[in-house]
Amino acid sequence: MAEAIPGGDLRVTAEILIPAGELRWRFSRSSGPGGQNVNSTDSRVDLMFDLAGTNALPQRLQARALARLTDQLVDGCLVITAREHRSQWQNRTAAQRRLVGLLLEAMRAPAPPRRATRPTRGSVERRLRAKRQRSNRKGQRRNQSLTPED
C-alpha cells in the first residue's frame, strides 16, 4: 500500500510520490483516557495536504480527486486527524496511511456505466406466479375470518 515513514516522502503508488515538503503536520494533546500520558504528550496528529496546489499528482487524477473529495476539503487542503494511538509516531503513520487510502479511492477510475436490461420472460412469469400465490393465500385467510357464524 504505502511506505509510511513519518517525516519522509510518501509513496502513493509506484508512479506517484508526494514530497515531504507538501505535507504539513500539526500536533496537539489528545483527549480521552490515558492518564498522565495524555496530559503531557502531544500525540494527536493533524496531517494537511494541499490537494488543489500539489504538483505530485497527474493533472487528470488530481482533478478526479478534487471532484470526489470536494466535501472534505478545507481551503483546498485535505486534513487527516489521527489520535487512536498513545504514540505520536504511530499516529503519524496512521494519518499517512489514511491519506494514501483516501487518495487511492478518490483517484480510482469510475465504474463503467450500467447497461439497461429488461427482465427475461421466465423471471417475469415467476414473479407474477409468486404474486398470485401470495394473493390466493391471503385471500383464503380473509375468507375464513369473514364467514358469518350460524
Image (cartoon, grey):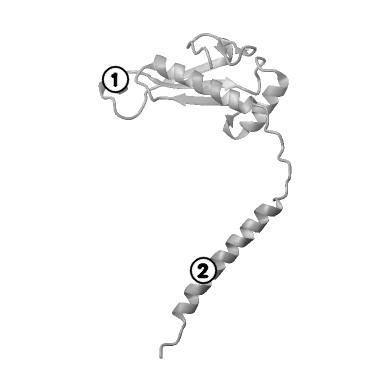
Residue at image location 65% in from the left, 12% down from the top: 15
Q: Position of residue 74 (x, y in %)?
A: 58, 29
* Element carrying mark 2: helix
Pick the front one: 89 or 101:
101
Reading the image, the residue beneath label 2 is 137
Residue at image location 62% in from the left, 28% down from the top: 106
Pick the front one: 100 or 53:
100
The residue most toward the top is 8
Pick the front one: 55 or 4:
4
Position of the C terminus by quadrant: bottom left
Residue at image location 53% in from the left, 15% down from the top: 2
Q: Which mark is residue 29?
A: none
Number of residues whose C-alpha sits closer than 10 Å to that of mark 2, classed few (under 14), some (14–19) or many (20 or more):
few
Mark closer to the observer (1, 2): 2
Number of residues whose C-alpha sits closer than 10 Å to that of mark 1, classed few (under 14), some (14–19) or many (20 or more):
some
Q: Position of residue 83 (x, y in %)?
A: 40, 25
Q: Is residue 11 above or below residue 32?
A: above
User: Upstream in the sequence, badge 1 or badge 2?
Assistant: 1
Q: Which mark is residue 37?
A: 1
Quarter of the figure with residue 21: top right
Q: Is residue 22 above or below residue 33?
A: above
* Element carrying mark 1: helix
User: Is 103 placed left or right of 97 in the picture?
Assistant: right
* Cα distance in 3D space between marks 1 and 2: 67 Å
> What's the residue type where badge 2 is placed?
Arg
Q: Is residue 21 above or below residue 39?
A: above
> What's the residue type where badge 1 is placed?
Asn
Residue at image location 67% in from the left, 23% down from the top: 62
Tell me how many marks there are: 2
Q: Position of residue 60 (x, y in %)?
A: 72, 23
